[in-house]
Amino acid sequence: MSRENHFVAEFYNRLWPWIEHDHNLSFCLDDGGAGASSTPDLCFHFLGQKQPLRVECKVVYSTTEGRKKKKDHFRAYRKQLISWNKVSNYSPHLWIAKREEP
C-alpha cells in the first residue's frame, strides 16, 4: 500500500464511530489517481446524512535541495483534475492532506 492509501485508511479509522454503516462505502485505492479511476479516495455517509461525502486524500511531501528551502508537493494527475473540474458525481466535496517529512 502507498503512503496515500495508508493515510486514507487512517482517516477512515478515525471517523469510524460517525460513519453510517448501513449505506455503501467506497475506498478507491488507485495510488493517487495513477489507475483508471478518477473517483475520490473515500466515499461514505455520516450518521443521519442523506447524501454521501466524497473525500480526496493527499500526502504532501517535503524535499530539500542542498541548503535551499524545503519544497512541498503532492501528486495530482491530469485525468483526475479534468474529471473533477466537470460537474459529476465523482467530484470530491473535501480535500484533506497530511505532511510527510523525508
Image: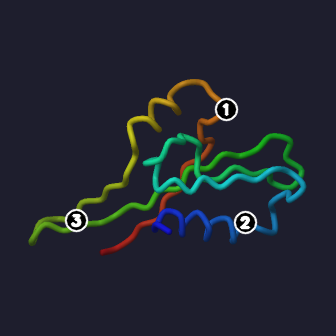
- Asked where in the image residue 67 lies, by quadrant, the reply is bottom left
Which element type, helix, strand or loop, lies under badge 3? loop
Give, as a three-letter code, the residue at label 1: Asn
Identify which residue is drawn at 58% across, 46% down.
40
Residue count near mark 1 (Cα–Cα under 10 Å), binned few <14, some 14–19, many ≥20: few
Q: Residue furthest left?
A: 66
Residue 65, numbered label: none
How many residues crowd around disc 2 within 10 Å: few (fewer than 14), some, or many (20 or more)?
Answer: few
Separation of marks 1 and 2 at Cα, in angstroms = 22 Å
Does label 3 or label 2 sit earlier along the sequence? 2
- Mark 2 residue element: helix
Residue at mark 1: 89
Q: Are marks 3 and 2 in contact (CB under 8 Å)?
A: no
Say which quarter of the image contains residue 22.
bottom right
- Numbered tag placed on residue 15 in the rendering: 2
Residue sitting at x 54%, y 25%: 86
Give how far across and how far down residue 72 sits, in percent.
30, 59
Asked if residue 57 is positioned above or below residue 78 in the image, the reply reads: below
**Left or right, 26 with reference to 5:** right
Q: Label 3, on which residue?
A: 70
Q: Quadrant of the C terminus?
A: bottom left
Question: Label 3: few (<14), some or many (≥20) within 10 Å?
Answer: few
